[in-house]
Image: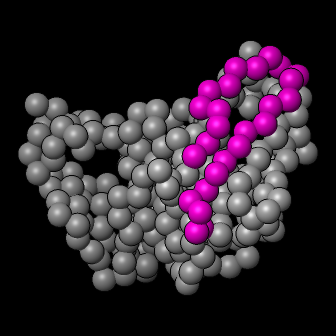
Amino acid sequence: RKEVEQDPGPFNVPEGATVAFNCTYSNSASQSFFWYRQDCRKEPKLLMSVYSSGNEDGRFTAQLNRASQYISLLIRDSKLSDSATYLCVATYTGTASKLTFGTGTRLQVTL
Amino acid sequence: DTGVSQDPRHKITKRGQNVTFRCDPISEHNRLYWYRQTLGQGPEFLTYFQNEAQLEKSRLLSDRFSAERPKGSFSTLEIQRTEQGDSAMYLCASSLVGTGGSPLHFGNGTRLTVT
């Protein structure tokens, strides 16, 4: 089982739609979580951190459920420019302070 | 530009050759990571440094791979006797150590093609 699992998609949604991605992580010791965005053939870029209480950044809302070990990302009012792959990331502060990435969920927003 | 820079951007090599990639992190960042990414997959952790100390190496990093960060600034990743399975995007990232996890800032990557 992968440490961080995501539905690879693709999710094809019309412009203006609301779309949600879920991600599960297997390491209960994971402490920090992030969503990264990756455009085709580009490097991943930090979209937002995920806080226990949930957090919002404009049209983007991230939620964390530690009991069920999943993270979600909600995108409201999708734009064409939101088309990208969204990578879920978990990490824990221990001997291995590395970020573990999911395979990514591809989003395609259409007219 | 104060971002993470990687060199070269692209490298095509023949099977069996050695290749070396360079990464210059964000100057105030003390952690430097190497990841590898293949098509349709997320980045896979290879190794990371805190200052000049290499603190962890993934099982993915066979003995043909070696990474260094001699002065705690730039890093190099060398692959000896390349194989076709080494073809991938090699991503370098840096961060500032702190409590909890620190987000990574990635470079543009080095795309390796082994023919």
Task: Establish if A24 lies above or below B78.
Answer: below
Residue at screen point 64% across, 37% down: B7
Q: Nearer the viewer, residue A7 or A78?
A: A78
For this rendering, which residue is in front, A50 or B20? B20
Tell me the residue at 24%/44% (across/down): A82
Q: Nearer the viewer, residue B17 or A85?
A: B17
**Is B105 placed left or right of A9 in the picture?**
right
- Where residue B58 sits: x, y (%)? 76, 56
In the current view of this chain or complex, which residue is farthest to the front? B1
**In the image, residue A68 above or below residue A21:** below
* Residue at x 17%, y 60% (from the top left corner): A59
Would residue B79 appear left or right of A105 to someone viewing this image? Answer: right
The answer to whether residue A79 is magenta is no
Residue A83 location in percent, x, y? 27, 39
| Place of residue B97 in the rendered image (x, y in percent of width and height, measured from the top left) | 60, 76
Report the magenta residues as a range.
B5-29
Q: Residue at x 39, y 69 (%)?
A: A49
Please indicate whether residue A33 sits to the left or right of residue A58 in the image: right
Q: Which quadrant would residue A23 be assigned to in this image?
A: bottom left
Q: Nearer the viewer, residue A21 or B46?
A: B46
Q: How far across and how far down the image is residue B80, in percent?
A: 88, 34
State whether residue A54 appears in this view: yes
Quadrant including the C terminus of chain B: top right
| Residue B7: in magenta span | yes
Q: Is residue A36 above or below residue B56?
A: above
The figure's colour scheme reads: one colour
Total label count?
A: 0
Relative vertical location of residue A79 with respect to residue B25 in this rendering, above or below: above
Quarter assignment of residue A81:
top left
Is residue A4 visible in the rendered structure shown here? no
Q: Along the horizontal axis of the image, is B24 left or right of B55?
A: left
